[in-house]
Image: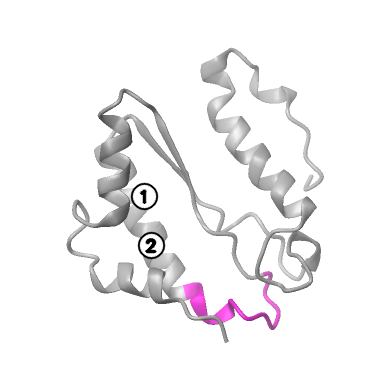
Amino acid sequence: MICCSLAAGAATAADRLIRGAIPSFVASLRKTGAQVVYAGYLRNPGTATPIKACGPAGNELDRRLAALDSLDPGMTFLPMSDLVPYGRLSYHQIDRIHPSLTGSREIGLRIARAIGPGLGRPPGTYLSTKN
C-alpha cells in the first residue's frame, strides 16, 4: 500500500492554511512576480489501485489548495480529481499510480487551457482525447 503521509499531513493541518510547505513555496514564487499554476493530484479511476486509500487526504489537500487559490489572485489551483473517467485505466501507468501518456497529455491540456488565454492562445484550440 502506498503511504499518503504528505496529503494526510496536510489534512491534519487544515486550519493552518497560510502556513506550511505548499503555501510557503507559492509565496516565495509569488514574491518574484511569478503567476503560479498548481496542479492537483491525479485520482483513482474507481478501481483497485495502490492509491485508492489516498482519496480522502487528496480531497482535503484539494480543499486547502482551492482556499489558497481564493486568497491569491496570482495563484491558480487546477484540481485533477475529476480528470480520470470512471473505470478508465488508460490514464495511469501499469503501476496504477503514475500518469500514463494519456493521463499526462490530459494534465498538460488542462494546464495549457489555464495559461493559454493569458499567452494569447484561444481556448478552443486545444485537442483532447477525453471528449
Q: Name the one closer to the observer, 1 or 130.
A: 1
Camera-nearest residue between 122 and 119: 119
Q: Is residue 128 magenta?
A: no
Q: Is residue 50 left or right of residue 60?
A: right
Q: Is residue 8 above or below residue 68?
A: below
Which quadrant is the N terminus positioned in?
bottom right
Residue type, mark 2 in image? Leu
Q: Element type at marker 1?
A: helix
Which of the 4 quarters of the picture holds residue 63? bottom left
- Name the secondary structure under disc 2: helix
Task: Tell me the amino acid under the disc marked 1.
Answer: Ala
| Range of residues picked out in magenta | 45-55
In the figure, is residue 91 to the left or right of 82?
right
Marking on residue 61? 2
Q: Is residue 49 magenta?
A: yes
Of the 4 image quadrants, the one containing the C terminus is: top right
Q: Nearer the viewer, residue 35 or 28?
A: 28
Colouring rule applied to residues: one colour
Residue sitting farthest toward the bottom: 1
Question: Residue 66's mark?
Answer: 1
Residue drawn at x 58%, y 76% as measured from the top left = 51
The residue under the point 70% across, 49% down is 104
Q: Which is closer to the viewer, label 1 or label 2?
A: 2
Question: Which disc is residue 49 wearing?
Answer: none
Other-residue count near label 1 (Cα within 10 Å), few / some / many at <14 / 14–19 / ≥20: some
User: Magenta part mainly helix, strand or loop?
Assistant: loop
Q: Residue at x 76, y 65 (%)?
A: 93
User: Residue 111, position in %: x, y?
Assistant: 58, 37
Position of residue 68 relative to residue 13, above or below, is above
Given residues 30 and 71, the one toward you in this image is: 30
